[in-house]
Each structure stands twice: as structure tokens, then as C-alpha cells.
Amino acid sequence: MTTMSRPVLFALLLASAVPAWALDCSGDGWLDGACRRVGQVWNDGQGEVYLPGYAYHLRSAYRREKINSFNEQAWGFGLGRGLVDDDGDWHGLYAMAFLDSHNDPEPIAGYAYQSRHHFSENWQGGLGFTAFLTSRSDTLHHFPVPGVLPLASVQYKRLAVMGTYIPGGKGNGNVVFLFARYGF
């Protein structure tokens, strides 16, 4: 299997597995409640398109030579399903792939939640988190790893500009990742 096909296969497997395990959530525990929410998003949510676009590496965390070697144009594509609940909060399921800092494809699939504040009829801001699985060439040779990151957005009608911060130390992490989400 080529290196390029592993991330694509990983994303496809995750995307196809979501509906299978999200349907049987019959218990009373918090995990069953989360499972029911994921099923609700999958079954009742609307389609969404994700367009990854930019990864800003904090200049204070890296040497100039390292910054110059990084790809910050994190172009990619993704699809998902999103649902606004009775409280006006957004829940999303997504799978996308983009070019990472080393120009290698990085797939990611997960669940996202944002509590939203409506500034006007058309403008909203959101804060929340995403829990996901991703796979990178420089981390365990494409072995899927889980993660949880903060998530912020500004939304006009159906178009949202979203961002997260990947923490790190000197010479790793410390990245602001920006992408767009459009609900259709």
C-alpha cells in the first residue's frame, strides 16, 4: 500500500464506520447519550463542506530555518454533517484531509461541538471543542492517534470560518489551523 493511499483509506473507513456504531445506543450512561447525539447528527443533520486552508506556526516556537521549511498552505477538502440543537448549539461529524506542515496528506475525522452566541440574525460566534482521530507521516508512521482540541468560529449565514490551536513546546506544535465550513 502506498503512503498516499493509507490516509485516504483511513478517512474512508472512519467515515463509513460512524453510522454503524451510532445506531445502537440503548443504555442510560453518558456514553450512550453521546452515542445518541452522534446518531442524531448523522441521521438528522445537514450536509457540510469543509475547506482547510491555513496553518500558522507561531514564530516564537521555531527557528527561522524551520519556519521557512514548513508548508502553511494547508489546502484540502472534507465532508460532514452538522446539526443545530434546541439551544442553538452546533454539533458536527466530519472527515477531511489536508496537506500538513511537511506537505504530506493528513486525514482527520471526528466530532465537534460549539456553544454559539448570536450577534444578529445572520452573525454568530462559537466556542467549543473537537474530538478526533488523525494520522500523520511524522507521528507513528500513519498510525491513527486520537486528539481533543479547542474550536472557535465566526459564522455568517451558512458560512463559518473556524480555527483551532494545536499546543506544543519549543520546536513542535504551536500551530493555529484555519478552515472554512459551509452548510448546504
Image (cartoon, helix red, strand yellow):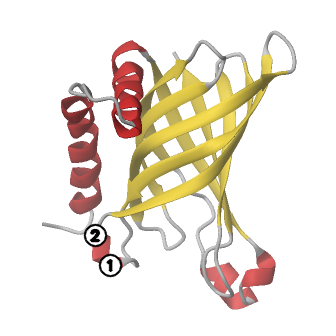
What residue sits 68% from the left and 72% below the top?
174
Q: Could you tell whether 42 is left or right of 73 in the image?
A: left
Tag shown at residue 140: 1
**Local SS, label 2:** loop
**Residue 107 in view (yes/no):** no
Instruction: Identify which amino acid the numbered label 1 is placed on.
Output: Leu
Q: Are marks 2 and 1 in contact (CB under 8 Å)?
A: yes
Q: Residue furthest front?
A: 28
- Crowd around label 1: few <14 · some 14–19 · many ≥20 (10 Å): few
**Local SS, label 1:** helix
Q: Nearer the viewer, residue 119 or 2?
A: 119
Decide: is 150 above or below 49.
below
What residue sits 23% from the left and 25% below the top?
23
Q: Nearer the viewer, residue 27 or 56?
A: 27
What residue sits 33% from the left and 24% below the top?
39
**Residue 8 in view (yes/no):** yes
Instruction: Identify which amino acid the numbered label 2 is placed on.
Output: Phe
Could you tell me residue 13's position as x and y percent? 21, 46
- The residue tagged 2 is 143
